[in-house]
């Protein structure tokens, strides 16, 4: 990747360097007091970590999970922050064992459950919340133990949105995991 710079050595970035820069920029945005800027940062984190193990590892090590959880807590009344926070957490954690541990240790499971509890009427939050929980809990028994105490939220999402195929399929799988 080539970027503008003052000298040839400044003008070249490695793929790894670009990922580090993108993750750092996204985390700064997620920390913003402005929900709109935080939402943009959440989208950037979701993008840089989508199907990119290096991006996931860099994000986890740089504190992305803590930043996302903090943004969700600061903006609990904002459904878009909750939806995008669940999405970003899902992408950061998917197929990345160190980040699956971090979501448990850094409060991400609780943040997703709180988003679902607070925004029962928001189908997008319910769908992203179920998907995030499924990523966190699939093949990670320790995360199941943390999340299953709130299985009633999954039951409520399933009952509230009977025609939403995403919520229905992910919710059924979560119910099986939590049994």
Image (cartoon, helix red, strand yellow):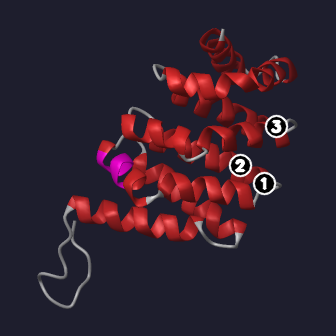
Assign a secondary structure to mark 3: helix
Main SS of the magenta part reads helix
Q: CA distance from mark 3 to mark 1?
A: 10 Å
Location of residue 60 with respect to 62 vertically, above or below: above
| Mark closer to the chain start, 2 or 3 | 2
Q: Earlier in the sequence, mark 3 or mark 1?
A: 1
Q: Which residue shows up at 63% across the image and 9% down it?
A: 176
Q: How far from the left and from the top, in percent, is residue 120? A: 85, 35
Q: Which residue range is magenta in the image? A: 54-58
Label 1: how many Cα within 10 Å (few below 14, some 14–19, many 20+) = some
Q: Position of residue 52 (x, y in %)?
A: 34, 44
Label 1: which residue? 76
The answer to whether mark 1 and mark 2 are in CB contact below 8 A is yes
Which residue is more in the foreground, 22 or 137?
137
Under circle 2, the secondary element is helix
Query: Where is 178 relative to 90, above or below?
Result: above
Q: Quadrant of the C terminus?
A: top right
Q: Position of residue 110 (x, y in %)?
A: 67, 40
Q: Nearer the viewer, mark 2 or mark 3?
A: 3
CA separation in Å, label 1 and label 2: 7 Å
Which residue has dot 2 on it? Answer: 82
């Amino acid at each position: 990747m080539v970027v503008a710079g003052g000298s040839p050595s400044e003008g070249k970035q490695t793929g790894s360097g670009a990922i580090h820069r993108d993750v750092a920029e996204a985390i700064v945005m997620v920390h913003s007091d402005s929900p709109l800027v935080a939402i943009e940062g959440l989208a950037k984190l979701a993008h840089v970590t989508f199907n990119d193990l290096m991006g996931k590892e860099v994000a986890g090590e740089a504190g992305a999970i803590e930043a996302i959880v903090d943004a969700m807590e600061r903006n609990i009344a904002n459904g878009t922050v909750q939806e995008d926070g669940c999405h970003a957490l899902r992408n950061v954690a998917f197929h990345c064992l160190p980040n699956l541990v971090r979501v448990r240790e850094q409060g991400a499971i609780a943040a997703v459950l709180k988003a679902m509890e607070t925004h029962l009427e928001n189908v997008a939050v319910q769908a992203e919340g179920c998907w995030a929980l499924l990523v966190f809990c699939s093949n990670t028994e320790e995360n199941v133990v943390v999340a299953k105490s709130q299985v009633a939220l999954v039951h409520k999402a399933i009952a509230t949105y009977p025609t939403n195929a995403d919520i229905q399929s992910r919710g059924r799988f979560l119910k099986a995991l939590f049994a």
